[in-house]
Image (tube, rainbow, N blue to C red):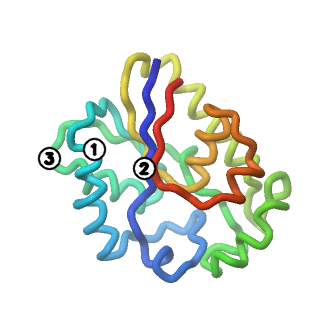
Amino acid sequence: MITIYFEGHALTSDNEANLASGHNDVDLSDGGRSQAAGEKRQRYEDLGIDTIFTSDLRRAYDTAKLMFEGRNIPIFQDARLRECDYGDLTQRPRTEMKAVRAESISNPFPNGESLQQVMDRMKNFIDDLSPNYHDQSILIIGHAGTLWGLEHHVNGIPLTKLISGEFVDTGTFTI
């Protein structure tokens, strides 16, 4: 059995401006750095996290570094944990991306990827965890697409339901 904790990356300037970041490798904002070193760090102080995985985007990796500074827990970056590539809608208002999100489940965003492609990446990642991290507690720091992949593949929640709800930036899963 593997316990997976999920934490969304801390705030970025794109988040604060309500822009869709996608694969844009944006930095944490000042508020995001404070958030990671403060409330997000405190949330995991007493949990026995064995290993941390983040997407290879700076906002996720930097969140992990700030949350676990001074603790001897390995942090691994994995591109499969990236947010969806919104293509032409990257760094456009989130409302524009949300307006076409439902049709982007199987059809890629213009010059980007589909949400199903994100789910496929996440399934591949989850399948790789099972034989290698048995009886461990891992933390994944990622994005909305990362969480949706966990919810979809571990809990069987339909993607159509996940994309219509509000994003909650934490979760716990057992595989």
Query: Which structural element holds mark 1?
Result: loop
Q: Residue furthest left?
A: 70
The residue pinned by badge 3 equals: 70
- Count how many numbered circles sit on residues in the image: 3
CA–CA distance between discs 3 and 2? Answer: 19 Å
Q: Nearer the viewer, residue 57 or 45?
A: 45
CA–CA distance between discs 3 and 1? Answer: 13 Å
Query: Which structural element holds mark 2?
Result: strand
Left or right side of 125 for 64:
left
Mark in front: 3 vs 2? 2
At horizontal 57% and vertical 77% (from top left) the residue drawn is 19
- Three-letter amino acid code at disc 2? Glu
Mark in front: 3 vs 1? 1
> Dot 3: within a 10 Å radius of its alpha carbon, few (fewer than 14), some, or many (20 or more) residues?
few
At horizontal 50% and vertical 33% (from top left) the residue drawn is 173
Disc number at residue 44? 1
Contact between marks 1 and 2 (CB within 8 A): the answer is: yes
Query: Which structural element holds mark 3?
Result: loop
- Residue 114: x and y in percent read 76, 55
> Dot 2: within a 10 Å radius of its alpha carbon, few (fewer than 14), some, or many (20 or more) residues?
many
The residue pinned by badge 2 equals: 7
> Dot 1: within a 10 Å radius of its alpha carbon, few (fewer than 14), some, or many (20 or more) residues?
some
Disc number at residue 76? none
In this view, 22 is above or below 139: below
